[in-house]
Amino acid sequence: MLGQFMQLLDIGANLTHESFRHDLDAVLQRAHAQGVSRMMVTGASLDGSTHALALARAHPDTLFATAGVHPHHAIDYDDATDGHLRELALDPSVRAIGETGLDYNRNYSPQDVQLRVFERQLQIAVDARKPLFLHQRDAHKDFIALLRRYRDKVPAAVVHCFTDSGDALRDYLALDCHIGITGWICDERRGTHLRELVRGIPANRLMIETDAPYLLPRTVRPQPAHRRNEPMYLRHICEEIARDRGEPVEITAENSTATAEAFFGLPARDAPQQ
């Protein structure tokens, strides 16, 4: 089991979600009690990114933000959105550009619009010199082709909530991308392939995340009645990943936290003394 005082960093938590509005302070307290001392609040729309930054400012040294427009919302992206995102990107609490990318599974926005909006946000990352927080679902060919054009112009890129194939993983690693693993790995219906693939992710490219309030790990016992995922469950995901990688959980925790600190430009935080 993970030591009580190990520090974890959740690289993707949707804490702007309405389900957290009534008890966010308690959510953060429960996360801290499980060793999750810092969380990246995902921005997935202009309003969501603005809210994510507000939360980061309200909880300094605990919460940090990303700023971007998810492909689901690409249809709403215009020049004003681009300008506002560029302003947000300048704030030191905004540590990455995204969540941005392509999603051909739902196609809530037309694919040509998604591609255009993705490229505009890639350029924001280039201009702001900040890492990319990326989303891809059922769009790997177009996604990797566009990413290849920009990868050497940005400091780093993480493919968040990776659920894809071994071939896709190898493509991302060849581009020196980081990989974010969620509780999807705990899903015996859809995530069993990740249990083998996660062994092949270099320690300095692997980061962990909850994607709260989504993707509650199915192996958590007891399952909460509300079915809401929280950053506190990052500890459980870390333990599952360590088991799959065949390494002590302390090693998985230490490496993933150090990797996330380097990726987002955060200072290392010493574990509190017992």
Image (spheres, grey):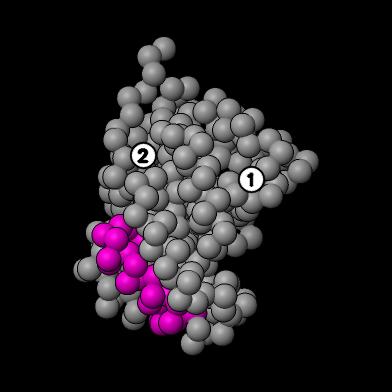
| Residue drawn at 43 percent across, 22 percent down | 5
The percent coordinates of residue 224 (x first, y second) are 73, 39
Q: Neighbour class for label 1 at 10 Å: few (<14), some, many (≥20)?
A: many
Q: What residue sits right under mark 1 in the picture? A: 229
**Dot 1: element:** loop
Task: Tell me which amino acid carries mark 1.
Answer: Asn
Q: Which mark is residue 120?
A: none
Q: Is 25 positioned to the left or the right of 171 in the image? A: right
Q: Neighbour class for label 2 at 10 Å: few (<14), some, many (≥20)?
A: many
Query: Which quadrant holds the C terminus?
Result: top left
Task: Report which quarter residue 253 is drawn in.
Answer: top left
| Residue drawn at 39 percent across, 70 percent down | 121
| Residue drawn at 43 percent across, 63 percent down | 85
Tell me how far mark 2 sits from mark 1, CA to CA.
20 Å
| Residue drawn at 32 percent across, 64 percent down | 125
The percent coordinates of residue 1 (x first, y second) are 49, 28
Q: What is the residue that sits farthest to the right in this orientation? A: 225
Part of the protein shown in magenta: 114-143
The percent coordinates of residue 196 (x first, y second) are 43, 56
Q: Answer above or below: position of 2 versus 262.
A: above
Task: Tell me which amino acid carries mark 2.
Answer: Thr
**Dot 2: element:** helix
Q: What residue sits right under mark 2 in the picture? A: 257
- Whether residue 271 is visible: yes
Q: What is the residue that sits farthest to the left in this orientation? A: 152
Q: Is 152 positioned to the left or the right of 52 in the image? A: left
Q: Answer above or below: position of 197 versus 229.
A: below
Q: Answer above or below: position of 221 versus 103.
A: above
The answer to if 242 sits in the magenta stretch is no
Task: Report which quarter residue 140 is drawn in.
Answer: bottom left
Q: Answer above or below: position of 141 versus 214.
A: below
Q: Is 28 positioned to the left or the right of 167 in the image? A: right
